[in-house]
Each structure stands twice: as structure tokens, then as C-alpha cells.
Amino acid sequence: MSKEWNAGTFSCCHDVSNCCMGTFCTPCQVYSNAEKLEESGFLCCLLSCMLPCVPIFMLRSKTREKHNIEVDFRINQNIKFKLFEDYI
């Protein structure tokens, strides 16, 4: 049985240390998250210094897979449309 994502937009602010680490030291946050997901924290941290979005998307996908969280592609499509509607 799949679950739906249940975190709110600003729910990261409930854990102040997590919020500060993500805001001021993103590579450290990526390292910590990768280690929790049993991935190479060092490689993800290094990659986040060069291409910041790549390890974040990889880890997000791994988290969804690990916790069996369903992805709502309609939301992603609406975001893409809103970002590029001036060019369509």
C-alpha cells in the first residue's frame, strides 16, 4: 500500500537544526541524508558542491522508494506548465 506525502510546506522549520543545516550548509545536509539512506555521503556531498540539484533529486527518489510514497505527477506537470507558460 502506497502512502501520500504528508509534510507541509514549512514543516522543515519544526526542527530548527535541520532547517539551519539545510539553509546554511546544504552539502552537510546532503551528506547526512545520504548516510541515513545508506548511500555514500561523501560522494553525494561532493556532487552537491558541483551540481547541487542532482543528489537532492536522487535522494528524494530513494526516500520515496524506501518509504513507499506515491508521487503525484499532476502537481509536477502543473509546476512545469506555470514555469514555462510564457514560452508556450
Image: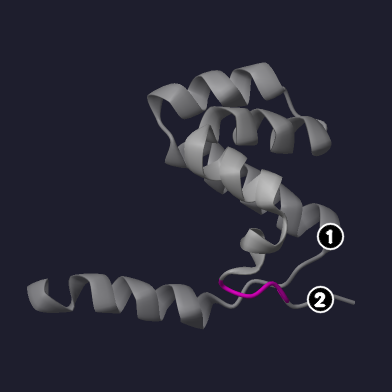
Name the residue beneath numbered marker 2. 3
Start and end of the magenta stretch?
5-9
- Amino acid type shown at disc 2: Lys
Rounded to the nearest angstrom, the CA distance separating label 1 from label 2 is 8 Å
Furthest-left residue in this view: 87
Residue, x 54% and y 47% (percent of image)? Answer: 57
Q: For mark 1, give the secondary structure.
A: helix
Residue, x 71% and y 47% (percent of image)? Answer: 62
Per the rendering, the mark at residue 17 is none
Which quadrant: the N terminus? Answer: bottom right
Percent coordinates x, y for residue 70 in the rendering: 72, 72
Which quadrant: the C terminus? Answer: bottom left
Per the rendering, the mark at residue 67 is 1
Residue situated in front as seen by the camera: 17 or 6: 17
The mark that comes first in sequence, 1 or 2, is 2
- Asked if residue 8 is among those painted magenta in the image, a careful observer would answer yes
Name the magenta segment's main secondary structure.
loop
Image quadrant assignment for residue 30? top right
Mark 2: few/some/many CA within 10 Å (<14, 14-19, 20+)? few
- Amino acid type shown at disc 1: His
Percent coordinates x, y for residue 16 in the rendering: 67, 52
Residue situated in front as seen by the camera: 88 or 32: 32
Residue, x 70% and y 63% (percent of image)? Answer: 14
Do labels 1 and 2 touch, CB within 8 Å?
yes
In the image: residue 76, left or right of residue 38:
left
